[in-house]
Amino acid sequence: MHYIDPHIHMVSRTTDDYEAMREAGIVAVIEPAFWLGQPRTTVGSFKDYFSMLVGWERFRASQFGIKHYCTIGLNSKEANNEELAEQVMEILPQFLAKEGVVAVGEIGYDDQSEAEDKYFRLQLELAKEFELPVMIHTPHRDKKNGTLRSMDVIQEHGIPEHMVVIDHNNEETVKHVLDRGFWAAFTIYPKTKMSKMRMVNIVNTYGSEKIIVDSSADWGVSDPLSVPRTAAIMREHGIAEHHIHLTCYQNAITVYGQSGQFNESDWKQDHLVKQADLHQGNSVLRGQEAKEINFKNSIGD
Amino acid sequence: MGDRKLDFTKCVVGKMSPEEQDWLNVKMAAVKESARRFPIFFSQASRFIANDVPEWNTDEIQTLENIYPGFGSTDWTKRNLARTILICALDTNSDIQVLRVFFEIAEMNELVALYKGLFLLDNAADFSSQVKEGVRTNMVNVFDAICLGNPFAAAYLEDPAWNQLVLKAIFMERPLYKIQNIDQRRNKELADMLQDYIQERWAAKRTVSPEVWRLVHQYLREDVKQLILEKELEVLEKSAIETILDSNATVGEEFWNNIGKMNEINLN
Ligand SMILES: [Zn+2]
């Protein structure tokens, strides 16, 4: 069984995570550009971060048999530093044009401030210009209103709903999101937000047609195996295989594939990863013997 | 445009589909006009140019080898070729500025194309510090782009940087026989460093690539000779070492290339 985690911040994760993820069947990940916990103070930090997403992290993932894609955007928290935000807006287009950049994101609201609104709208226009899908981060505080407002603004800018994933949904928001025709993603954290059992209920209620499961694993307490683990729990509770396939794999391809940058054939070709050349502190394997990994498609739990 | 850039572009454009040629011609013209949109065009090659490797006949390969020694020893995808043509379209007076900025934000595959293409530029020598920086990468495909089948390093890096490149290639287990002009750039300092490395590896009961002896040839030290006599050698290693121990032996490129190829087969 193959899985995709369409929202995970791998720069914060270890090689143990990569190994476990591939072992559990994850073949591709999407890493949205986001906040690093520590606010950035210069545009150069953003430039290097975006470059890392399309450079070193992409390479690092490849060493473990995982295809790495990303989304590029100015996150809502840092949009509040307007002087910096202006400079970040200037460098976004050249990153949005790059190979393997599958959406503008994650963007949206945090405090729902004026500055956040301004840069949210500007980036929606960029998504139109580059014909890319959009990944929306919905706020933790005042979530319902923030989610509704995000959808209003997206529709105001004339972006078709099938191009937009509204992420971090809960039971309060999902119906609105689906009724308005958007994709609804759910972040499964180990304890907070959505638990795996709640996901079973969501699928039982709303089906799988426009639902996406992700881990949003980052530098906080989170689980990079959330997607395969949630799939296992769904399976245990009698959810049909095609629902699992859609929510934990196929829907991500359908929506982000609209970028032309996210194709199943990219990772279907071979699963043989040559970890040659990784000796002596010169690479990710640091002193370990290079090995060839022929990955079996097993599920973690 | 310099001759080298022009000749390369001419050879390569014909391998693109009509749609790809249209796209490239428009972008080349635009880049010649102004480099402002160069980064976007260079990136967007991933959307408009296929990534397969074109077939070449012997004449074409010969022509390309004359323009770019080593061309035939690695795979050039159409996308890498197209990106190289775009670099060639840059004005020589401003290319260093444009590319220096772009190198900082290039993604993995773009870096590969950039490093492969630099040799063709009229002012290629101006990019030697960029290539030295590139040698520090840990992305194997980017390192390969600099190191294998690319004439830039041998042409423009001075000995210390060249030696670093070769040492790193050995640590990363890259096929040394694909390094362009590896024999011409042999030097005593490199041979010494490698013999220290051999001693260190053998002391730790680890092996060294049989290709290493290619660079030790004619610089073999007495202390290492002594070690060799006490050591049980593997087949390829034995063949390489016996050759350099025999001062009468004339060893050509072909011998070492075969050692390299056999070693590559053993590794895979
Ligand atoms: Zn996130």
Image (cartoon, coloured by chain):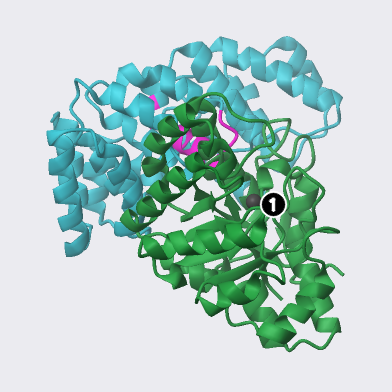
Chain colours: A green, B cyan
Taking the image as drawn, is residue A260 in sight? no
Q: Is residue B141 magenta?
A: yes
- Please indicate whether residue A241 sits to the left or right of residue B252 in the image: right
Count up the numbered dots. 1
Q: Residues within 10 Å of mark 1 (few under 14, many from 20)?
A: few
Report x, y in % for residue B185.
46, 19
Q: Quadrant of the N terminus of chain A?
A: bottom right
Secondary structure category for the residue under label 1:
loop
In this view of the protein, which residue sits in the foreground, A168 or B67?
A: A168
Q: Chain of mark 1?
A: A
Height in image: A294 above or below B7? below
Q: Residue at label 1?
A: A141
Report x, y in % for residue A282. Answer: 67, 31
Query: Residue A68 falls in which quadrant of the image?
Result: bottom right
Residue located 86% across and 27% down the image: B204
In this rendering, would A22 be left or right of B29?
A: right
**Residue A125 visible somewhere in the drawing:** yes
Q: Establish whether ligand 1 lies closer than 8 Å to the Cβ of label 1.
A: no
* Segment tinted magenta in the rendering: B137-152
Q: In the image, is residue B103 above or below residue A8?
A: above
Q: State the residue in front, B90 or A95.
A: A95
Hey, which quadrant is residue A226 in on the image? bottom right
Q: Amino acid at mark 1?
A: Arg
Q: Position of residue A96 (x, y in %)?
A: 41, 48
Classify the position of the C terminus of chain A by image quarter: bottom right
State yes or no: residue A11 in magenta. Answer: no
Front-most of residues B130 and A220: A220
Residue B65 is left or right of residue B238, and the answer is left
- Residue drawn at (75%, 42%) of the image: A219
Q: Measured from the top left, where is residue B70 in percent x and y?
A: 36, 38
Q: Nearer the viewer, residue A127 or A109?
A: A109
